[in-house]
Image: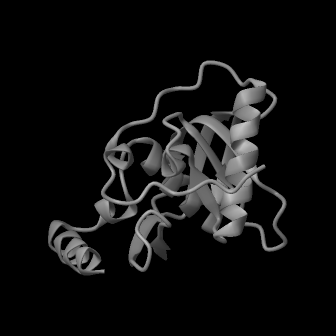
Amino acid sequence: MPVRPFVMWPDKRLRTPAAPVGEVTDEIGAIWEDMIETMDAMPGVGLAAPQIGVMLRLAVVDASTERGKAVRMANPQILHSSIELRPHEEASPNLPGSYARIERPRAVTVTYVDHHGMTVRKDFVGLWATSVQHQIDHLNGRMYFDNLSKVKRDMFLRKARKR
């Protein structure tokens, strides 16, 4: 299970929606394992496949304090979002040294295909919910800073380009 290199911003793959996964195969399982290894090496609480150049709708999330509880998701979709927002300083290994305070729904209900090939419906709250939403953004060709106002996003990108 190798740690995979990250695609660096502004690579166009980070702005391209990922392709749906047709079936959970051994190859998909191996990609998930590489993603978990890569996420843990960051260290981070989530990773989407396009971040490592794999253009499939795959994500892993592990916001547990003890680690080893990674949720493997194929084709995740948000079914419901809470009205209550939760602010969090978000960053990405695709744009090192940059971060922004983003407000996202505090809780989400998500449907996805798990590592057994079963469709799952699950509620995520707090940091888990933030990470799931962040990963789904990546799968849709969006970065976390796309959630900022235009003025804040422009300032953010000017600073990021200087780095």
Q: Quadrant of residue 13?
A: top left
Q: Position of residue 72 (x, y in %)?
A: 72, 43
Q: Tell which of 75 and 6 is nearer to you.
A: 6
Q: Quadrant of residue 111?
A: top right
Q: Position of residue 54 (x, y in %)?
A: 53, 39
The residue at 66%/71% (across/down) is 43
Left or right of 41 in this view: 147: left
Left or right of 13 in this view: 27: right
Q: Tell which of 115 and 94 is nearer to you.
A: 94
Q: Quadrant of the C terminus?
A: bottom left
**Residue 54 seen anywhere in this rendered image of the structure:** yes
Left or right of 156 in this view: 2: right
**Residue 118 seen anywhere in this rendered image of the structure:** no
The residue at 72%/65% (across/down) is 40
Q: Position of residue 119 (x, y in %)?
A: 71, 27
90 over 73 or under it: above or below:
below
163 over 147 or under it: above or below:
below
The residue at 78%/49% (across/down) is 1
Q: Position of residue 102 (x, y in %)?
A: 40, 71
